Every structure is written in structure tokens, then in C-alpha cells.
Amino acid sequence: MEIRNKANKIRLFNWKTPQMRAFHFSWFAFHICFFGWFGIAPLMAVVRDDLGLTKTQIGNTIIASVAITVIVRLAIGVLCDKIGPRRAYTWLLCLGSLPVMCIGFADSFESFFLARLAIGAIGASFVITQYHTSVMFAPNVVGTANATSAGWGNLGGGTTQILMPLIFSGILMLGVNEALGWRLAMVVPGIVLFLTGIAYYFFTQDAPNGNFSDLRARGELPEADGEHGMGASFATAAKDIRVWALFVVYAACFGVELTINNIAAIYYFDNFELTLASAGLIAGLFGLMNLFARTLGGIFSDLFARNSGLKGRVRWLFIAMLCEGVALLFFSQMQVLALAIGIMLVFSLFVQMAEGATFGVVPFINKKALGAVAGIVGAGGNAGAVAAGFLFRSEALTYQEGLFYLGIAVIIASLCALVVRFSPEVEAEENAAYREAAGAEPSAAMSLR
């Protein structure tokens, strides 16, 4: 898929261009999805007591919250190719708001499990976010655009840990008991999800030159059938070993982040004997690093590309992954609260830079099957979270032991980054495209203002 008039600069305070509207709406939508997706996580200590959940049952709900996302992410990427990111995001946000608001009706482990399973579908929002920024921004800034939009979206994992206990506390101040309070608290993110879906439909468009339906009507984009259909697009991506290498890499970075989002609050609550609000605040620091950390991963990806082309992007991805694994090993051994927080922040920095670095590579794997590639790689993150979830549901392993084994797995997975290679022709073509975008004429740059 060749899209014209991509932005070669990111102008954060410009809302007039379709590129920047897509940028801001995509990260905000993903951010709000995190509220719905992980809104219950910082309240799990209360839910555990209310529903009488065991550690194994809590682990099963954690797995459920990320398992369904694997399937939905695989589908949502090719759906973006077919109907465009604008309509795909609108449907996902509006339909996804329903189970978020309805989780309050859960009165047993089984019903709570099913609710978390259904909510997990909104985690596919990440794929649409990355797809939308990939079609809007040129090669010289696409890594930064992808990383920043995803990072500010992932920031929702941190703000959720902080805000949901506050929303819960505010509801309790109205005289509501805890059993009803956590249920009412989840209505808040559900309403915001629905309203965001409506706004996405009216204020964004699929590509710089218009929506996919308009581009196809003008002959600027092939029809989504035959060799350009959903099945053919997915098959093309699935046959590429590099896609599955990035699947494993993303499983070991974003999958780890999802796991930490699910267990951090209860981990600090139990291991360091903190209050629910304090544990949520500290757990939130992990996600808050997304404010800049994932962006740094994309910036370094673009900088490595300037000096070493696509090979540079891959080398940087390997470095970030290796450092993530080492930092996680250290974090797993921390017994003092202050040290645990400090090492957690270092670990968080490399986790999120690795995520940014991954999607600094994805747009260049196969442009004709961009949605399918993004969907498969994105699904890897949730597959990793599912696999990691089994470490933390076992009564035989402590959370610290689980984190240690997870660190070893990340170091091994980092080697998969080295499997990603590009042909000399592709390298030359992308290097030329990078130089052209970076050295665009003033008139082209002015059009983005």
C-alpha cells in the first residue's frame, strides 16, 4: 500500500492537518482503552475479598484479560486494510465500552472471568493506533510517531493505576460500600470509551488524502479483495519469518509490560505491606514512564536509521531488548522498597524503548500487508502476556521467582531481533526514501502547518 502526502514532521500543537489529528486521537483512544482494559487491576485487592478469589483464580483472570486480545489483534490489522483505521477504531471503542461497564454485574469467579475476557478485546486498539500513524507519517519520523502515539497510549497503564483508586475512594465518600464501589468505578472508563469512539469517527480520516473508500473510488488505492484482500494480506505476512521473529520480540517487551500492569499493585501491596492507594501510585510509575520512554525508543530507531539504515533499526532493537532482560533480573531480586522502585523505573525505561524500537521496524517489513504485519506482531505482545501469566498463577512460585524466570526469557528472546534482515534493494530504497523525507523542500514542510 502506497500512501501519498505523509507528514515528514511531527507538529504537536497543530490540530489542523489530518496527520496530526490522527496522531492525537489515536494515542488518546489507546490511552482510554487502557483505562477500560486495566481499570480493575489496581482494585483487585478489593475484588479479591468481595468475590473470594484465590491466587490461581486471579492469575486466570489476568490471562483472560490478555488472551482474547491475541485473536482480536490478528483480525483487526487486516480489518484496517479493508475498512480503514477510522471505522475500525470507532467500532472497537463503542462495542468495547459495553463489557467494561457491565463487569460490575459479576458476582462470582466465573462471571468475573468472562467479563475480563470480553474486555480484553479493546487491547487490539494498539494495532489500529500503530496502523494509523504508519500511514500518516514519512520514513524519517515514522519510528518517532509510532513510538510516541503508542507510548502516550500505554501511559494509560500508569494513570489507571493512580486514578482508579482515587475514583474508587471518591465513590466510597458518597457512602457506598466497597463491594458496590468497585463496580460503579468501572462505569467511568466505559462511558469515556464510548464517547471517544464517536469523536474518532467525526474528527479523523484514514489517510492524508482522505478515507480509504474515497481513495478506492478515485483509483488511488486498490480494492480490498483478491490479492489485496484480507486473506491474501494475512497469508503474505504469515509466510515471512521476520514477522514471527518480531512477534517473539514484542511478546518479550509489551507482553512483559502488560504482565507488570496486572500484578504490580497487588505485588507491592502484599510484599511491602502498603495501602491500596500507595501500591497503586508506585505501580503507576511503571506505566508513567511511557510519557517519554517509548518515544525515546522510536527516536533512537530513527537516528540509527539515519546512520545505518534498516540495519541500524534492528541493532538498536536488540540492544534495548538485552538491557530490558538484564534490568528485569535485577528488579526480581530487590527486597528494599526504595531499591525496588528505582530498578523498576530503569527496567520500565528499557521495556518501553524496546517497544518503540519494535514498531520502528514494523512499517518496513511489508508495506502491501502493513495491517497484517502490525496485527501479528501486536498479537505477540498479548501472547507473551498470556505465557507470562502462567508464571504468576502458580501457588508454587512467588512473584519474585516468576519475575526472575521472565527476565531470562527476555534475554533469550532478544536474539530473535537479529533474525530480521532486509535485502540490499529494500535497504537502498528505504535509505533513499528516508533522505528524501528528511530533506523535503520547504513547500512540502509548510503544507503541514
Image (tube, rainbow, N blue to C red):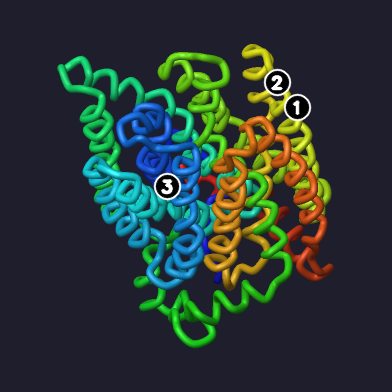
Q: In whole angstroms, how far apart are the C-alphas of marks 2 and 3?
A: 36 Å
Is any atom of residue 195 visible in this view? Answer: no
Q: Is residue 54 above or below residue 2?
A: above
**Dot 3, how many residues are within 10 Å of its Cα: few (below 14), some (14-19), or many (20+)?**
many
Question: Which of the numbered marks, if any, corresponds to residue 26?
Answer: 3
* Residue at 75% from the left image edge and 27% from the top image edge: 330
Q: Is residue 57 left or right of residue 260?
A: left
Task: Pick whichever, 264 or 429, lies toward us.
Answer: 264
Tell me where residue 303 appears, x and y as whole percent.
Answer: 74, 42
- Dot 2 and dot 3 residues touching (CB under 8 Å): no
Is 134 placed above or below 26 here? below
Q: Which residue is mark 2?
A: 334
Q: Nearer the viewer, mark 2 or mark 3?
A: 2
Pick the residue in front: 23 or 355. 355
Find residue 330 and name its label: 1
Residue drawn at x 33%, y 20% as measured from the top left: 166
- Judged from the image, the secondary structure of the residue bearing numbered disc 1 is helix
Report if the CB atoms under discs 1 and 2 are less than 8 Å apart. yes
- Secondary element at image label 2: loop
Q: In the image shown, does 369 or 429 lie closer to the viewer?
A: 369
Residue 120 relative to residue 303: left or right: left
> Percent x, y for residue 278?
46, 15
In this view of the protein, can residue 43 be seen by the observer? Answer: yes
Of callouts 2 and 3, which one flags the residue occurring earlier in the amino acid sequence? 3
